[in-house]
Amino acid sequence: MTDGDVRPAVGLNLHTHLEGSIRPRTAAELAEAHGIPAPPGGWEDALRMREAGTLTTFLAHVAAAYPLFTTPDAIGRIVTEAVEDAASDGVAYLELRFGPATHAGGLSVGAVISAAVDGLTEGIRRSGMPAGLVACALRHHDPATNEEVARAAADRAGRGIVGFDVAGDELLFPSLEPMVRPFGIAAAARLGLTAHAGEAGTAEHVRDAVKRLGVRRIGHGIHAADSAEVIRWAADEGVCFEQCPTSNVLTGAVPSYAAHPIRRFLEAGCDVVIGDDDPTTTGTPLSAEFEHLVARVGLEPEEISRIHATSLKRAFCEDSTRAEVRNRLAGVATDGRAPQG
Ligand SMILES: [Zn+2]
């Protein structure tokens, strides 16, 4: 990217997955280099979900990328390119989450995390955009594996890893009891804490994640809107909801953009931030999410401004980075150059 390509900042991306961010062309190149057969219809079709379906079909498109996380070099490249792509989209700050244990077939969890951190460092160097990684425990992994992920993430706390999350199927694996110890390890290392909850599950799943895991950010959480009592409670508790409208439409969590409950959260006084969840799977990077929020969900400019301000406040970054991101959002180049666009 050259200076002439710099776009005005579109916002902070606080919920996006590495596995759903791989470039289809990179997928094809890595597959060829590692002898992985191309899926029928090619990588673009395997990775991209074009019509609304279910969470299961959505996750199958994301999982098509898993075999490509083969070596430290491959993992590093996928991370670097995800950072570059977000910067090219105009993102002011990126939190990129991934499940280290998913990719630890031939590598240790620590080696996967190190490779991702190396890729992040290179992406930041190339793009100039601040970014951090969030390590995900997975509901279907055994407790020992999730504790290993938490310990390896804690070892890199503040050095590439900024947060800890739990992802996976909350209907098949609703109990958060096995997550209490991993989240305790992450909390002790002062990692930012978030949890996917209330995406396919219920409003009570959201309250359960906040109470049991001590998280103050929730991935999706859109079913909290089904309960006036829970959404009021969440606002009082200062719970922040990371919302990803296009993903919610594609997984069938909501029937349409117009039916997305984001305004209910805002009106209840909840903190709301935005992510693009899996931009390769959805085809909608963060800039497109904000366009949909205005054109199809109907948010007003002051509501978008409030989301930006909330994102700055709730990002899992150091205050020095927050100041830099504030300038990027305002269109002020931190090296003293005039704003570009
Ligand atoms: Zn997610």
Image (spheres, rainbow, N blue to C red):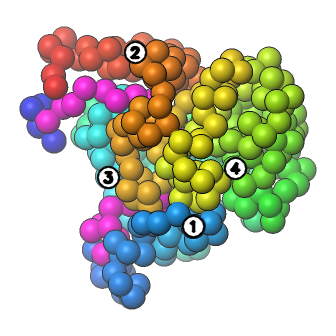
In the picture of the structure, the residue carrying the numbered disc 1 is 53
Q: Nearer the viewer, mark 1 or mark 3?
A: 1
Mark 4 or mark 2, which is nearer the start of the sequence? Answer: 4
Report the mark closest to the observer, 3 or 4.
Answer: 4
Against 234, is 283 above or below?
A: below
Mark 1 vs mark 3, CA separation in Å = 28 Å
Residue 184, given in percent of the width and then of the height, sits at 81, 38
Place of residue 155 in the rendered image (x, y in percent of width and height, measured from the top left) = 63, 41
Name the element at disc 1.
loop
* Numbered label attached to residue 311: none
Q: Answer yes or no: do the residues labelled 2 and 1 have beta carbons within 8 Å?
A: no
Nearer the observer: mark 2 or 1; the answer is 1
Taking the image as shown, residue 157 lies to the left or right of residue 72, namely right
Q: Which amino acid does label 2 sit on?
A: Arg
Q: Which mark is residue 81?
A: 3
Circle nearer the N terminus (3, 2): 3
State the SS at label 2: helix
The amino acid sitting under disc 4 is Glu
* Quadrant in which the N terminus appears: top left
Q: Name the residue under label 4.
A: 199
Mark 2 and mark 1 lie on one chain; the one further toward the N terminus is 1
The answer to whether marks 3 and 2 mark residues whose Cβ atoms lie closer than 8 Å is no
| Residue drawn at the location 32% of the way across and 52% of the way down | 81
Q: In this view, does 97 lie to the left or right of 41?
A: right
In front here: 197 or 178? 197
- Whether residue 190 is visible, yes or no, is no
- The residue carrying pointer 4 sits among few (fewer than 14), some (14 to 19) or many (20 or more) residues within 10 Å by Cα, namely many
Estimate the spatial distance between the alpha carbons at disc 3 and disc 4, rounded to whole Å: 28 Å
